[in-house]
Amino acid sequence: MKAVIMAGGKGTRLAGVAGDIPKPMVSVGGKPILEHQLESLARSGVREVTMVVGHLRNRIMRYFGEEQSGIRIHYFVEESPLGTAGALVNLSAQMTEPFLLLFGDIMLDIDFCRFYAFHLEKGSKATLFAHPNSHPLDSDLLRVNTDGRVVGWEPKNRPRQKDHPNLVNAGIYVLSPEIFAGMQTGRRVDLEKEILLPLAASGGAVFAYRSTEYAKDMGTPERLRLVEQDLTAGICQARNLTNPQRCIFLDRDGTVNRLKGFLSAADQLELLDGAAEAVAAINRSKFLCCVVTNQPVVARGECSLETLDEIHARLETLLGEKGAYFDRIYFCPHHPDKGFTGEVPELKIDCSCRKPKIGMLLKAADELHIDLNASYFIGDSTVDLQTARNAGMKGFLVQTGEGGKDGRYPVHADAVFTDLKAAVDAIIKGENHDERL
């Protein structure tokens, strides 16, 4: 694998912090952002990188020279700004295989081998590293189909007419050089507007690689401060998918949102008090946060998969407005019993994913490298507690929703809490004191 790093940014929003150094040279944990990026690339076996430099380029070139972290470094000098892709048009002639593209203001720790393999597997022309984040309202949001192909793109800082899944373009890519074929060199080119958006709109092979790994821009003093905190706490490295992950799994109805029977429309959804704050606390920790929910309304014909997507988009929008997000939402659409008006026959099965079976948890463990035995499950029913038992994890009960009064399974909680926030606070407090609950 080869990589290109766009390292010519001025960092005007960081002027009070960066002073007279290039934005990618801003220090985090005693070393420049660029150095962290090179170290992450090196751990994935990248041995050749081209840095696109411009503003105060000598600072970068003197610091890194021709080799760093076992990586050979080349430089492409922009005498005048060429946008986010003008340099790539020039460089594409040197690329015989897909290459990684990073922007130099992103703190990251990624298994690039996994990312690159996804690009090849999909036969993609351009693959975007995508993830949920805590500020989706000022981020580029993506819509993808079930295969991961990008089918919609909402640019940041524009009014949004409807709820949207929290899936953000992080500014990290795998690009096949043929997407630049025939383009004129030496002119300013915008990667998204002139290449990726038209390619996706025409049905071209543009895919989103959804990851839970650490990738955050440090373009403002506040975001830089948070990145510093995460690095010190070991969160950046811990989130790399080469490492086993720990997760706090959440039931949906009655745990995160108010229990109103089974929801069949997005406007019925209402967050429980403190739920967004609880999810945000998980997001700031070393834990992933995944929802695992039975949705038999789909099999019964009371809610289509499209409507369920709208409900989850509403849920993610409400959380995003409060700086919180889910790493994944897993749902079971099946129901074993027949006889409902409008039911969907192919979904009326005795599946392996309907709680308290653990199919959804096993899928999460496979996709996100989760150690289930080191994870937690929080829910409002004995179904949730039995699911936790079946998966070999701690099961915590909240007194919202059903409050454990469903009586479907003779199982006891490892601990009982008034609500989701109290449960999450107890887990994180115990972890911070090395006292696992």
Image (spheres, grey):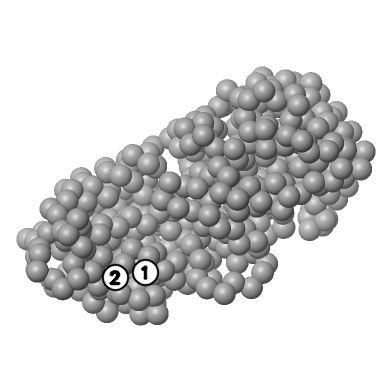
Tell me if residue 396 comes above or below residue 126 in the rendering: below
Position of the N terminus by quadrant? top right
Q: Residue at x 87, y 42 (%)?
A: 187
Front position in the image: 43 or 20: 43
Q: Secondary structure at mark 1?
A: helix
Give the camera-side residue of 226 and 167: 167
Residue holding disc 2? 303
Name the image quarter holding residue 85. top right
**The disc labelled 2 sits on which kind of residue?**
Cys
Kind of element beneath mark 2 = loop
**Label 1 amino acid?**
Thr
Q: Position of residue 318 (x, y in %)?
A: 47, 72
**Left or right relative to 172: residue 243:** left
* Residue 136: quadrant of the picture: bottom right
**Does 171 sit left or right of 277 as displayed?**
right
Instruction: Determine the image quadrant of residue 72.
Output: top right
Q: Position of residue 339 (x, y in %)?
A: 9, 69
Q: Is residue 233 visible?
A: no
Residue 393: percent from left, percent from top:
24, 48
Other-residue count near label 1 (Cα within 10 Å), few / some / many at <14 / 14–19 / ≥20 = some
Q: Residue at x 27, y 48 (%)?
A: 361
Which of 267/373 is in front?
267
CA–CA distance between discs 2 and 1? 6 Å
Classify 10 Å Cα crowding around label 2: few (below 14), some (14-19), many (20 and above). some
Residue farthest toward the left in the current orientation of the protein: 410
* Residue under the image location 92 percent in, 43 percent down: 80
Residues at marks 2 and 1 touching, judged by CB atoms closer than 8 Å: yes
Residue 38 position in % (x across, y down): 66, 31
Query: What residue did someone put label 1 on?
Result: 307
User: Which residue lies at the image location 33% right of the left edge and 39% below the top edge?
Assistant: 366
In screen coordinates, is 156 left or right of 300?
right
